[in-house]
Image: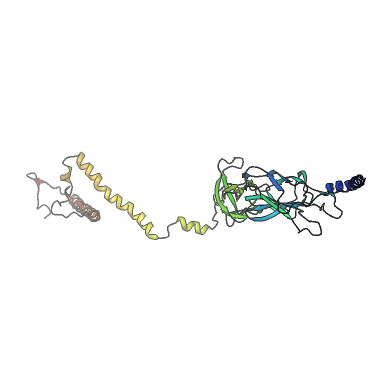
Amino acid sequence: MRRFIALTATAALALALAPISAARAQEPQPPNPNQNPLSITINKPAAGAVSGTIEVSVDIALSDATDSIRRYTVTLLNGSTEVGQFCTQTFPSPFGTPPDPELRKPSAAVRFQWNTERTPASGGDENCEGNGVLPSGGSLSKNGTYKIRVTAETWGAGGNEQQPGQGVNTDDESSGDLAVSNAPKAPTGVKLSYDKGKSTITIEWNKNTEPDVSKYRLQECIVDKSSKPCDEWKTLADVSSTAASVEATKPNIYRYRVAALRPNASNQTMVSEYASAKGDPTEIEVKEDPPETTTSQPQATAETVPPTPITVTKTVVQPTRRVQRAAPEVVQRIVEEEPGYESKLPYQESGEAIGGLPIDESGQGEGQRAILIPLAGGALLLVFAMQVHYLNRRAHAGLEPVPVDGEWDDDWDE
């Protein structure tokens, strides 16, 4: 009888305690603080060169179903330096008083797009869970090597919102290197101006917004007509400023264009598209200056009339000398055409004098002969006149001269 009563009491007690045991079994239990239940997976393009917008996904899972995710953060690193956070998320503790199993977070999934031309804003978006989430962009990024890092924490044993530092388990995983290499944008605001006094063309443009654009490439094309296209562009220089001046002195049509330069992840130069002037003018035409005209008449006369009288004297005398020198040539031709004529001349061809008279080769003998000939002629005329006068006297005297033996009588006049 006593045994029956004891078995009955034991059964009744078991039935009374059964609901309490069932309720405790349903409560979340803190995990063992010596275990790390986190598993993080980052999905992104394969390590290598990337540009533009890329897809990134992060999966976080707990191996212990009784634990819960407390927080996770997705960060962007340039080398070992943090440059911004894509997002960060914090969850409440399910281990409060009273416990709330509905708050347990055994896993998390993050899906977002990253425009590699910009760094994420620090702090990120609190609501970064979901598909197609695009984190808010921060500043423009430089080309280089980047990593995506995910850090996650669990509540751990005894953890709660009031005391988050107790029993926290953490895990950290970073993606492989991403070689971001975005080409620079083409410069804007290109304009041209011409300084005629200095014969220079100035090209100006706006500074690029990319932080690692350090130089600009300037090219020139010269054509002879405005309607002619450019067949060849010549690189003048890579400049660091946003303006350059070029000398232009020859009459031509000058055109210019500019490109931005930036290094890629491998420190190789990347060149943007070229930009030319869009406004007026789009090209510079250098014209040839008209020739200068001189209006001063005295100056023109001085340039054309020789100022020295020596030149005039030489011009006058020289023909006379040429005439005097030409005379022997004419004489020489007469001698050759009439043989024996040389004997009739007062000088020989060799220049020797005939009859002992000296020959003046300087031309002064011509003047002497010009004087002697008239004198001789005058003497002959005088003799002839005397003879006529004598004959007239004899005729008037009535006497006729009679020749004697064919000769005139010398005594007739006695």
Q: Position of residue 269 (x, y in %)?
A: 57, 49
Q: Nearer the viewer, residue 142 or 73?
A: 73
* Quadrant of the image containing the N terminus: top right
Scheme by which the image is coloured: rainbow
Q: Residue at x 11, y 52 (%)?
A: 412
Front residue of 291/234: it is 234
Extreme residue in the front direction: 1
Judged from this view, the residue extending furthest toward the left is: 405
Q: Is residue 54 visible?
A: yes
Picture residue at 67% right of the left edge, 55% below the top:
82
Where residue 309 appears, x then y in whole percent?
Answer: 39, 60
Q: Could you tell whether 62 is left or right of 355 in the image?
A: right
Tell me residue 113's x, y (percent): 72, 45
In the visual, does 414 lie left or right of 112?
left
Q: Position of residue 100 (x, y in %)?
A: 85, 50
Classify the position of the C terminus by image quarter. Answer: bottom left
